Image: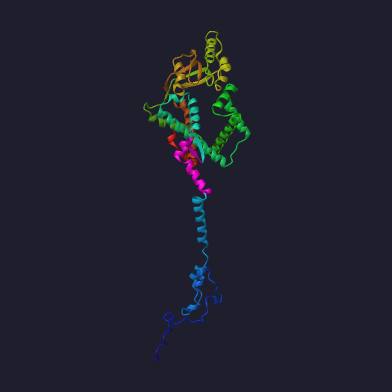
Amino acid sequence: MPDPPEPPADSSEGEDPDDSAPSPADLPGAEWPDKPIRSRLRSLPYSRHDTASRVDPDAIVGRRFPWRMLLYGIVLIYLLCDLQLFNGPLHRALEKRRDLTSADRAIERGWVAVVNGETISLAHLDRAVDIHLHLRGKTRADLSTSALRHTRGAVLQQLIDDLVVAHHAAGRDHTVSEATVDAMVARFESQFKNSEQLELRSAAQHFDAEGRRARLRQLAIQIDWLESHLASAPQVTEEIARQWFDDNRAAGAEGGFVAPEVLRARHIFLSTLGNDTPELEAKARDLHRQLTEEGADFAQLAASHSQDQRSNKLGGDLNWFSRERMPADFYDPIADLQPGEISDPYRSRLGWHIVEVTDRRPAREASFEDMRDEIIAYLESEDRRQKIDDFLKNLRRASNIAVFPEQL
């Protein structure tokens, strides 16, 4: 039997490959593979013994000019020169940032906070605190040291919120119509009995007529922009209000809500703001004499002389109120008056009052019907307050804020 043919030699065992073998590109229908340049170079045929003709792709790539490293070097040299040698734009920006956030510099210049590069001065905070207390019938002398510090901190947070909203609204070029500004100005000026009182208040806040309108325009823009970004609150239905009433009544110590004693009264009010004179007290006592001795009509005198713009058009009517709803220095002098009785003229922190009690209701357990409107208003207000708080927190997170508590 003839010997079987020997198997062909394996070219990987030392034999040279057949140089005459066609490359894949020479085969009919073959296409050059879609590979990166380095893979393409490595797929070129060459003889492993022909080192002179071998192409080293890494050597080709390595001989490329190092443009990237050169660019990195130029940028690094520029940064070093800007920061260390020439006090360039980047150096000045960093110095300004350090300057604005330095506690020592803040104390030196009288800053209490910096919001997106805009400072809030100690004088600005003091004015805002005085206005805040005045609207509540108080002065700084009425507060303890800790209470005053707490109030200053709360007012500062309000100023920061105002600036944050103003910056975001300005950054988006938000604006309002002149009619909106006119309405805001009219509402502000309606608080004052005459132009003299208006100018006195404006001077206390360092505003002339032009500055006052500009400030009210800014306030209108902030309010309108904030409103436009608040999601509409869901309507509080009677079912929701009743559920809240039932849940909270069951949790109460008495097992129910108590409607406190309430009064209905009307008053004549003379403000002492910028006019705290003996003549004003004399006027209050003369009006009281007309009511008690001459039988003058209370509603007519209130409409003619009361400086409470909300009630004088209603004959001085304040509607129903409880002790909890009124300042003590207003409520206490009339707490024991019976319907039809008129108080003597008395002084609160806001001015002179002459009050006639027109009706009283004793304290009693409150039903849902008694509290329905108040509960709905409360739930709507709470929902709106929560939305505003959440929105302001998001704005603050997107802002650069530095506070210097040493100044409080």
Residue 302 in the image: above or below residue 106: above
* 166 inside magenta stretch: no
Residue at the right extreme, as displayed = 178
Q: Main secondary structure of the magenta part?
A: helix
Residue at the top extreme, as displayed = 293
The image shows a total of numbered marks equal to 0
* 110 inside magenta stretch: yes
Residue 155 is situated, as x and y percent measured from the top left of the image, at 47, 32
**Residue 386 appears anywhere in the view:** no
Residue 406: name its quadrant: top left
Residue 194 in the image: above or below residue 60: above
Q: Quadrant of the N terminus?
A: bottom left
Residue 394 in the image: above or below residue 269: below
Residue 389 is situated, as x and y percent measured from the top left of the image, at 48, 37
Residue at the left extreme, as displayed = 253
Q: Residue at x 57, y 40 (%)?
A: 170
Asked whether 323 or 269 is in front, the reply is 269
Residue 203: name its quadrant: top right
Residue 107 in the image: above or below residue 62: above
Asked whether 38 or 59 is in front, the reply is 59
Residues in magenta, as a range: 87-116
Residue 163 is situated, as x and y percent measured from the top left of the image, at 52, 37
Colour setting: rainbow
- Specify whether 287 is left or right of 248: right
Residue 226 is situated, as x and y percent measured from the top left of the image, at 54, 37
